[in-house]
């Protein structure tokens, strides 16, 4: 798990979009398993700051949308949906609700489950918990660690919270003000499992 920290506007979110294949870098390149990333890749999942859910679809249909696009049959999608709901600890009763009927925390769980649907090797998280209250955010950080322990993707997390970075990350990459440059790459060598304390 790598955490990216830096001031607003330094390019953290842009960097995630380059890694996700949504933007082309002006210089340099992003690589996954030795190959250049030039377009979206199903091996990379992205969770934006805002959940970006399709408002006309239920939570379950939002979660399974990537599976539909990948032509998974309905029975296989249903099985994967059950596993994803459990993985992100979403109340099964919430799966029939539309995004507007869900709390902010539930919407983020749906967005996270959707990003995990195709079992990505890399999970990019662009301040996904920043809009949550402090207690909910701490709980989500611990759940993120639990999720990482179970699914084991490489995670790149953008955060403004030093405490959050230390809690979840193995490395903290600090970026300078615009234009963003790496000014520090710090190894967090605290043993796991970690606690908020």
Image (tube, rainbow, N blue to C red):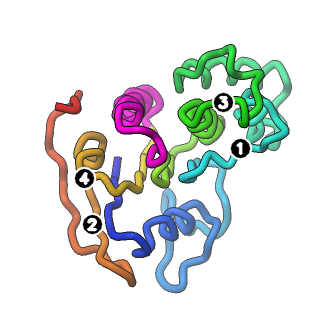
Q: Nearer the viewer, residue 138 or 193?
A: 138
Q: Which residue is mark 1?
A: 53
Q: Earlier in the sequence, mark 1 or mark 3?
A: 1
Magenta-colored segment: predominant secondary structure:
helix
Q: Identify the residue at horizontal 73%, vertical 36% (top origin).
A: 100
Q: Identify the residue at horizontal 48%, vertical 46% (top origin).
A: 131
Q: Which mark is residue 102?
A: 3
Q: What's the CA distance linking mark 2 and mark 1?
A: 30 Å
Asked whether the beta carbons under mark 4 and mark 3 sit within 8 Å of each other, the answer is no
Per the image, is 142 magenta? yes
Q: Which residues are magenta?
A: 129-152
Q: Identify the residue at horizontal 46%, vertical 44% (top origin).
A: 129
Q: Nearer the viewer, residue 187 or 13?
A: 13
Res 104 visible: yes
Image side of residue 134 versus residue 195, left or right = right
Quadrant of the image containing the C terminus: top left
Which label lies toward us, 2 or 4? 4
Residue 65 in percent (x, y) is at: 77, 38
Q: Earlier in the sequence, mark 4 or mark 3?
A: 3
In what element is the residue under mark 2? Answer: strand
Which label lies toward us, 4 or 3? 3
Q: Residue furthest top?
A: 93
Q: Which mark is residue 174?
A: 2
In what element is the residue under mark 1? Answer: loop
Q: Is residue 58 above or below residue 182?
A: above
Q: Earlier in the sequence, mark 2 or mark 4?
A: 4
Image side of residue 153 versus residue 109, left or right = left
Q: What's the CA distance linking mark 1 and mark 4?
A: 28 Å
Residue 166 in percent (x, y) is at: 23, 46
Q: Which residue is mark 4?
A: 162
Asked whether the beta carbons under mark 2 and mark 4 sit within 8 Å of each other, the answer is no
């Amino acid at each position: 798990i790598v955490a990216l920290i830096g001031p607003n506007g330094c390019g953290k979110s842009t960097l995630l979009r380059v890694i996700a294949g949504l933007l082309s870098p002006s210089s340099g390149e992003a690589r996954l398993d030795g190959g250049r990333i030039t377009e979206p890749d199903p091996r990379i999942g992205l969770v934006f700051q805002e959940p970006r859910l399709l408002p006309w679809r239920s939570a379950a249909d939002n979660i399974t949308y990537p599976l539909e696009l990948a032509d998974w049959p309905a029975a296989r999608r249903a099985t994967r949906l059950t596993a994803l709901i459990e993985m992100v600890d979403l109340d099964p009763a919430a799966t029939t609700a539309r995004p507007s009927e869900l709390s902010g925390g539930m919407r983020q769980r749906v967005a996270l489950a959707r990003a995990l649907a195709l079992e990505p090797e890399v999970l990019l998280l662009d301040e996904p918990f920043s809009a949550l209250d402090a207690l909910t955010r701490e709980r989500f950080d611990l759940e993120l660690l639990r999720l990482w322990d179970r699914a084991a993707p490489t995670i790149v997390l953008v955060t403004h919270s030093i405490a959050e970075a230390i809690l979840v990350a193995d490395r903290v990459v600090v970026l300078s003000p615009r234009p963003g440059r790496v000014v520090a790459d710090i190894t967090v060598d605290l043993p796991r499992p970690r606690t908020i304390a």
